[in-house]
């Protein structure tokens, strides 16, 4: 922990260095020299210097001594508020502390650390540490606004320090005190005044709370709290509990610190500080919602207190934003980070957090601007460099992103986020060897990082090092049992088989061709067209990321009925139920309340990038809520017809459509255009349905709206395909793998009829086929599940069995024959009417039971009708002989039965059953 003596002495030396006239204050000229000197690599313009000085002199007006300028206490406060880094500035100026004083302080600290905790009373021990009070006490203790006021509070603090020292020594001896190195991870961006100090954040301490030693500590801590409550005045009791809380917080006893801050809140409810500190404790404990509530109370108290707490407002805004990010509310967090940056333009942490949050919601250009400002103020800010590089990569500025990532790693060599993200960037660029090196460095810092282990395996696979990839996959499997790892192992096995077949080629990846859409043909009505599937897959990907398919469309209806939104007017004067994006995020949080914070953050990012960017094209930050609900409805969970109904109701809910039964045609048309612009962007707005005049006042009923919605060319006719994907895109097809990517097929399987290779959804939608199968055209049949594929494969066998039973059934078990044909027709389930046709009535008897399944055709000889199953085309000769078996004359003539049976068996032997599904009916 940094001592007040060291910190204040450094600030004093800086102050004296620039107090040229030795009047005890830094005027504007002297402050300007200080700002320039501590930022040697930054070239400030006069406007920037004046803006910084204006903000400093305005914010710290209480510390301005007339014409003399900013006092020493004011400069110390600026550093306490996080406006600068004392150590960095001190080193940049090349100053040195008095070596004798530093040595004495170090000697005193060593002596205190080396002393053993004795079993004597606290009163006896207090005398040993009294002379080192100032060296041992944190800077906050004597801070003008946060420090200790009463002498009795000092005694409580001294006793508490001894108690903590005892507990630490005992737990360290027993091996119960645990620490974790946090130096490798991105910090939360706390200001010094708000969160743990830099020393604490680098070394997290975990106390053992279940032992006897901790119970004794709590008992003695209760005694100290009792002493604070027994103070002579309410103010002194408040001072005591705040000091106890601060000491406990500095030693990372957050639960106990929270108890003290809560007690201080009870003593002075309108004071900002206890709410502030309680919020910090709650955040560290992971109780983000409660932390947010405490920060809001602190904000309310600060705003009501006038200028007294003005200096603290930026920190409250920053921590409030961090707490909201903990809940996944990133859009709301951005608002508070902006407020902090406006109030304190030199608050580089606020700018870094703003840039990171903007990156988190997909607003990359704004993120780059904010992060560059943060780096401008603090060039050695490794976390800001890391997030800036990620934003540059998202904008496809990869070369610059690599440079910035490398800068972050140079500043902090063990920075896990920078190493991991740089590895992903190298993977995207196809530089697999460099990617594997980055992931190896991640694992050196964080050995149990299973994602890094998995990505290392994939990068090694890309580099052709299959054996090393296999070892890495096995290591990842030891860390987690996620399904992604099993798929990756199956993929590796397939590549190994492919490599063996190709006599050990250098790469296990199969080559492929990209075929133009016109060469892709479909077999059957159930097979999805390639272009339509590509669009549906994009929509389905949005559903997966946003989890909107898990949000019932009825919740949208409930949201509209239970939460009224005031009507506002846009720039054109049109009434709208519009709200700001942060308020919209709160609605999404209610709709997706089943998501974890990090998952919800990803959902908001996807919705903001894909939907809000179109609805808020002007960048006003406001969105028409009714139109937003109507856009969401088609991709929410629920029956398709219900989704359409809720979309229509959302349009009716808008203030322009007040009759409740219909909507304006222009609104419905605008909705369809927006729907296609968002979900079918490849069509382009210019190709969408034109609005025939904004003055069109005609109304559209629900039935008319459905016609517009279901239009395959100008509406959202892709919904049936989307619904099919929702129902089956997690289906697996046994051991079937895609012939192109070699991954197990999940979702629909597309089988090429001639060459018999299979493709997954993605490869089929992209027009990829194996290079070994070059054809003029490709005919695909879609199988939603393996049972459908198996059924199609076994149909000829089922039919053959039914015909055989039919033949033998005519001389024996006729019911068995009827059951077999019925089973076949029901199993295929493709009944259809053929025109012209007439149902055959061959006469009385059992064959009448089969007549609904057969259609009668006329051959060239009008006297020889034959039967064809409505579900499948058959040879006319085969059908004709089957009918002959059913004729009364045949049943009376055993020799006719024998000859006809022989003819059927000969036909079955010569009939190409494997190609049964594509035969056509023909005449003799």
Image (cartoon, rainbow, N blue to C red):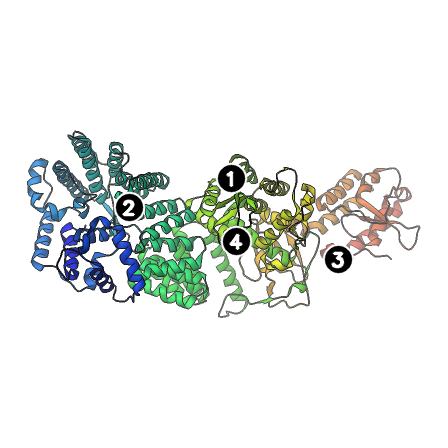
According to the picture, the residue beneath numbered tag 2 turns out to be 310
Question: Which of disc 2 and disc 3 is earlier in sequence?
Answer: 2
Q: Closer to the N terminus: mark 1 or mark 2?
A: 2
Residue at horizontal 45 percent and vertical 56 percent from the top: 363
Between marks 4 and 1 in the image, the one whose residue lies nearer the viewer: 1
The residues tagged by marks 3 and 2 sit, at their Cα atoms, a distance apart of 88 Å
Q: Nearer the viewer, mark 1 or mark 2?
A: 2
Answer with mark 1 or mark 3, whichever residue precedes in sequence: 1
N-term-proximal mark, 4 vs 2: 2
- Camera-side residue: 644 or 414? 644
Report which residue position mark 3 lands on.
912
Element at badge 2?
helix
Mark 4 lies on a secondary structure that is helix
Query: How far separated are the C-alphas under marks 4 and 2?
Result: 39 Å
Along the line of sight, the residue nearer the viewer: 594 or 136: 136
Residue 565, labelled with which disc? 1
């Amino acid at each position: 922990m940094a001592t007040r003596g060291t910190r204040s002495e450094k600030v004093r030396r800086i102050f004296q260095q620039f107090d040229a006239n030795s009047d005890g204050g830094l005027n504007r000229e002297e402050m300007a020299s200080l700002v320039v000197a501590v930022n040697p690599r930054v070239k400030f313009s006069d406007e920037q210097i004046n803006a910084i000085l204006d903000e400093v002199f305005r914010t710290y007006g209480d510390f301005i001594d007339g014409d003399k300028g900013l006092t020493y206490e004011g400069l110390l406060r600026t550093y306490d508020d996080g406006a600068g880094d004392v150590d960095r500035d001190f080193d940049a100026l090349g100053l040195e502390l008095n070596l004798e004083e530093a040595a004495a302080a170090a000697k005193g600290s060593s002596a205190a650390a080396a002393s053993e905790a004795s079993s004597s009373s606290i009163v006896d021990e207090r005398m040993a540490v009294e002379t080192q009070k100032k060296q041992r006490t944190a800077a906050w203790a004597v801070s003008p606004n946060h420090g200790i006021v009463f002498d009795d509070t000092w005694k409580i603090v001294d006793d508490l320090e001894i108690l903590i020292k005892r507990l630490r020594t005992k737990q360290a001896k027993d091996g119960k005190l645990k620490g974790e190195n946090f130096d490798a991870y991105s910090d939360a961006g706390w200001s010094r005044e708000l969160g743990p100090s830099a020393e604490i954040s680098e070394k997290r301490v975990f106390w053992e709370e279940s032992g006897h030693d901790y119970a004794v500590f709590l008992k003695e801590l209760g005694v100290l709290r009792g002493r604070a409550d027994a103070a002579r005045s309410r103010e002194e009791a408040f001072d005591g509990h705040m000091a106890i809380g601060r000491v406990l917080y500095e030693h990372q006893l957050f639960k106990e610190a929270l108890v003290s801050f809560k007690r201080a809140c009870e003593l002075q409810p309108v004071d900002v500080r206890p709410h502030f500190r309680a919020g910090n404790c709650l955040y560290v404990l992971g109780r983000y919602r409660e932390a947010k509530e405490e920060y809001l109370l602190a904000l309310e108290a600060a705003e009501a207190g006038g200028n007294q707490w003005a200096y603290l407002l930026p920190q409250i805004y920053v921590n409030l934003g961090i707490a909201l990010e903990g809940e996944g509310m990133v859009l709301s967090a951005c608002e508070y980070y902006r407020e902090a940056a406006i109030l304190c333009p030199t608050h580089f942490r606020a700018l870094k957090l703003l840039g990171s949050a903007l990156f988190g919601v997909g607003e990359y250009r704004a993120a780059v601007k904010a992060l560059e400002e943060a780096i401008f103020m603090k060039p050695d800010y490794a976390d800001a460099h890391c997030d800036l590089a990620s934003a540059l990569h998202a904008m496809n500025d990869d070369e610059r992103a690599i440079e910035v990532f490398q800068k972050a790693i140079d500043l902090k060599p063990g920075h896990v986020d920078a190493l991991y993200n740089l590895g992903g960037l190298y993977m995207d660029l196809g530089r697999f060897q460099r990617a594997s090196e980055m992931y190896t460095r991640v694992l050196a810092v964080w050995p149990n990082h299973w994602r890094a282990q998995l990505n290392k395996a994939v990068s090694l696979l890309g580099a052709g090092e299959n054996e090393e990839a296999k070892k890495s996959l096995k290591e990842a499997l030891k860390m987690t049992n996620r399904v992604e790892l099993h798929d990756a192992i199956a993929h590796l096995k397939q590549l190994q088989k492919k490599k063996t077949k190709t006599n050990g080629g250098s790469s296990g990846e199969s080559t492929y061709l990209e075929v133009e859409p016109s060469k892709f043909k479909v077999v059957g009505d159930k097979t999805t067209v390639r272009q339509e599937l590509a669009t549906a897959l994009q929509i389905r990907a949005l559903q997966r990321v946003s989890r909107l398919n898990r949000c019932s469309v009825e919740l949208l209806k409930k949201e509209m009925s239970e939460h009224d939104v005031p009507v506002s007017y846009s720039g054109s004067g049109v009434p709208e139920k519009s709200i700001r994006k942060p308020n919209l995020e709160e609605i999404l949080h209610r709709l997706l309340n089943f998501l974890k914070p990090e998952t919800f953050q990803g959902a908001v990012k996807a919705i903001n990038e894909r939907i809000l960017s179109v609805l808020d094209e002007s960048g006003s930050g406001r969105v028409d809520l009714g139109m937003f609900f109507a856009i969401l409805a088609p991709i929410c969970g629920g029956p398709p017809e219900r989704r359409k109904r809720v979309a229509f109701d959302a349009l009716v809910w808008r203030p322009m459509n007040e009759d409740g039964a219909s909507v304006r045609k222009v609104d419905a048309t605008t909705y369809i255009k927006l729907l296609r612009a968002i979900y079918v962007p490849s069509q382009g707005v210019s190709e969408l349905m034109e609005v025939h005049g904004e003055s069109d006042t005609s109304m559209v009923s629900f039935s008319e709206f459905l016609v517009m919605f279901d239009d395959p060319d100008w509406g959202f006719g892709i919904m049936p395909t989307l619904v099919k994907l929702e129902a089956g895109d997690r289906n697996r097809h046994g051991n079937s793998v895609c012939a192109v990517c070699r991954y197990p097929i999940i979702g629909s399987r597309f089988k090429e009829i001639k060459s018999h290779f299979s493709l997954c959804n993605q490869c089929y939608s992209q027009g990829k086929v194996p290079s070994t199968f070059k054809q003029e055209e490709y005919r695909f049949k879609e199988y939603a599940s393996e049972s459908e594929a198996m059924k199609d494969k076994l149909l000829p066998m089922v039919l053959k069995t039914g015909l055989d039973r039919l033949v033998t059934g005519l001389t024996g078990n006729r019911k068995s024959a009827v059951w077999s044909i019925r089973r076949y027709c029901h199993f295929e389930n493709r009944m259809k009417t053929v025109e012209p046709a007439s149902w055959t009535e061959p006469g009385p008897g059992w064959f009448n039971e089969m007549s609904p399944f057969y259609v009668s055709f006329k051959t060239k000889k009008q006297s020889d009708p034959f039967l064809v199953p409505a579900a499948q085309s058959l040879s006319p000769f085969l059908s004709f002989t089957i009918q002959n078996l059913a004729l009364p004359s045949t049943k009376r003539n055993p020799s006719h039965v024998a000859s006809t049976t022989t003819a059927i068996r000969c036909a079955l032997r010569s009939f190409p059953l494997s190609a049964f599904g594509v035969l056509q009916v023909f005449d003799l």
